[in-house]
Image (cartoon, rainbow, N blue to C red):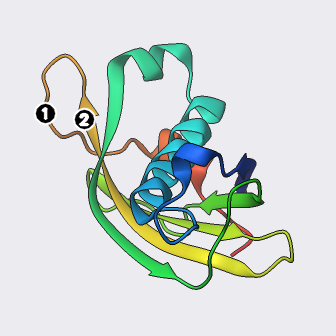
Amino acid sequence: MARFSLSITAGPDDIDILGHVNNAVWVAWIQDIAGAHWASLATAEEQAALVWVVTRHEIDYRGNVREGETVTAETWVPEPPRGARFNRHVRFLGPDGKVRVEAVTTWALIDRASGRLLRVPADLSARFLDTTA
């Protein structure tokens, strides 16, 4: 599987006192696209049994987005996981095609029932790897 994308339009509740999308909103959007990517590729059984948690965010802010503007969010996983963890790349492109925000986030896989970390199974990780990178 290659990259996953979706469109997000900034609403009034997303805007800070400077008139652009608040930094905390970008973090929420990063989690939203990761969740949507997971939902698009995981089976119902996997979604019921497994949950992903963020262990690290690294975010670079390159431009602003104002209320009513739409960004295209893209995410991909360029490398296989290391045990229970993997890095997910995310970027948000403005209407002009320029990158507004880029992030690398580290996620860990947890067994819902036990609450314990799980090594990411190879068949699961293979669905998320971007083989075009």
User: Residue placed at 24% from the left, 22% from the top?
Assistant: 112
Classify the position of the C terminus by image quarter. bottom right
As drawn, 72 above or below 94: above
Closer-to-camera residue (89/27): 27
Closer-to-camera residue (76/130): 76
As drawn, 133 above or below 9: below
Q: Position of residue 121 (x, y in %)?
A: 39, 41
Q: Are marks 1 and 2 in contact (CB under 8 Å)?
A: yes
**Whole-Å distance between the Cαs marked 1 and 2?**
5 Å
How many discs appear?
Answer: 2
| Left or right of 122 on screen, residue 8 | right
Q: Position of residue 52 (x, y in %)?
A: 34, 39
Circle on res. 8: none
User: Residue placed at 77% from the left, 59% from the top?
Assistant: 69
Residue at disc 2, secondary structure: strand
Residue found at the far right of this picture: 96
User: Residue placed at 47% from the left, 61% from the top?
Assistant: 16
- Label 1, residues with CA under 10 Å away: few <14, some 14-19, many ≥20: few
| Left or right of 78 on screen, residue 50 | left
Kindly identify the amino acid type of the residue bearing the numbered disc 2.
Answer: Ile
Residue at disc 1, secondary structure: loop
Q: Position of residue 74 (x, y in %)?
A: 68, 60
Name the residue beneath numbered marker 2: 110
| Left or right of 111 on screen, residue 132 | right
User: Residue placed at 58% from the left, 30% from the top?
Assistant: 39
The quarter holding residue 104 reads bottom left
- Label 2, residues with CA under 10 Å away: few <14, some 14-19, many ≥20: many
Closer-to-camera residue (22/103): 22
Q: Is residue 30 at least partly visible in the picture? A: yes
Q: Position of residue 50 (x, y in %)?
A: 34, 27
Circle on res. 116: 1
Kindly identify the amino acid type of the residue bearing the numbered disc 1.
Answer: Arg
